[in-house]
Image (spheres, rainbow, N blue to C red):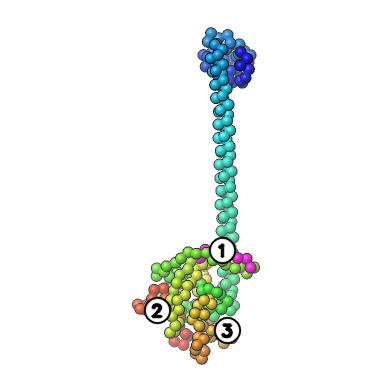
């Protein structure tokens, strides 16, 4: 009978139920033990084994419940961590967009302050490209980007490092495409960078294009010339010109045309 002291009241109640005994809710532990021992079905060895199994089942259930609770806790922590990371990524994306907007606004100010306008045509549309000797790469403006998309240009996605005014550098996602720019008798293949988040920005011809074309900017007299033909100059334009012209069927795909102001 001593083995009956190892379990809890719920174990004794379950044992009594397994023996076919009726156990009232108000019975005490001692009363349940007395009921079990005095039962006609009481045989110590078999009842002891049955009681041991009942206790082990209860302990196993407790263990399983604790493990399940631990798994749920870990899942909740993991979900919380994922939400935190998503929030951080969203905040980082917003920060990058804000930095890009700041940088683009800075570029626009630079355009107004120091850049030189050169007339151009892109697939039958006249426009104005801005030459900037302070920019290392050429950038396609929003309008040119949309035109190139319409013409089926091949764009490659890549990452570049953009330097902000405060010296902070940020990795941003951009597109690149190769175009042929025609300027007088010169033909220059140039890689353009597209800032997909930029709105209203103008096409920028940087040092990569200016060096290839041999273009020299004379900001004092507001004109430009080829380095091997310095006596023939071309005036800058002050405002953007957009005019539809007849398409030229012999132009290469993704061709940008620049012309001097005298023609």
Q: Quadrant of residue 242?
A: bottom left
The residue located at (47%, 85%) in the rendering is 260
Of callouts 3 and 1, the N-terminal one: 1
Of callouts 3 and 2, the N-terminal one: 3
For residue 71, above or below residue 86: above
Kindly report the distance in space between the C-alpha atoms of the residues bearing marks 3 and 1. Answer: 32 Å
Kindly report the distance in space between the C-alpha atoms of the residues bearing marks 1 and 2. Answer: 39 Å
Q: Is 168 part of what is drawn in magenta?
A: yes
Q: Is 143 part of what is drawn in magenta?
A: no
For residue 89, above or below residue 253: above
Mark 2, Cα crowd under 10 Å, few <14 / some 14-19 / many 20+, is few
Disc 3, SS: loop
The residue located at (49%, 81%) in the rendering is 213
Q: Marks 2 and 3: in contact by CB < 8 Å?
A: no
- Mark number, residue 219: 3
Residue 3 percent across, percent down from the top left: 61, 16
- The magenta span reads 167-174
Q: Is label 3 or label 1 in front?
A: 1
Residue bearing mark 2: 245
Residue 58 percent across, percent down from the top left: 57, 25
Residue bearing mark 1: 171
**Residue nearest the viewer, comparing 60 with 194:** 60
């Amino acid at each position: 009978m001593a083995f009956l002291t190892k379990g809890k009241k719920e174990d004794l109640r379950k044992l009594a139920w397994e023996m076919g005994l009726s156990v009232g809710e108000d019975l005490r532990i001692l009363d349940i033990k007395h009921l079990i021992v005095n039962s006609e079905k009481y045989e110590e060895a078999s009842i002891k084994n049955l009681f041991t199994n009942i206790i082990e089942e209860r302990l196993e259930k407790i263990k399983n419940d604790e493990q399940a609770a631990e798994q749920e806790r870990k899942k909740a922590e993991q979900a919380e961590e994922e939400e935190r990371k998503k929030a951080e990524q969203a905040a980082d994306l917003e920060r990058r967009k804000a930095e890009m907007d700041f940088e683009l606004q800075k570029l626009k100010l630079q355009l107004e302050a120091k850049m030189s306008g050169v007339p151009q045509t892109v697939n039958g549309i006249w426009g104005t490209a801005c030459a900037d000797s302070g920019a290392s790469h050429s950038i396609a403006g929003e309008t040119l980007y949309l035109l190139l998309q319409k013409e089926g240009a091949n764009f490659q996605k890549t990452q570049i490092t953009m330097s902000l005014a405060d010296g902070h550098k940020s990795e941003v996602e951009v597109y690149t495409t190769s175009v042929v720019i025609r300027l007088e008798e010169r033909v220059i293949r140039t890689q353009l960078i597209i800032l997909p988040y930029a709105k209203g920005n103008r096409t920028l011809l940087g040092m990569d294009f200016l060096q290839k074309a041999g273009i020299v900017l004379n900001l004092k007299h507001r004109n430009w010339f080829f380095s091997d033909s310095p006596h023939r100059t071309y005036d800058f334009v002050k405002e953007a010109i957009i005019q539809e012209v007849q398409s030229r069927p012999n132009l290469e795909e993704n061709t940008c045309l620049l012309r001097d102001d005298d023609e």
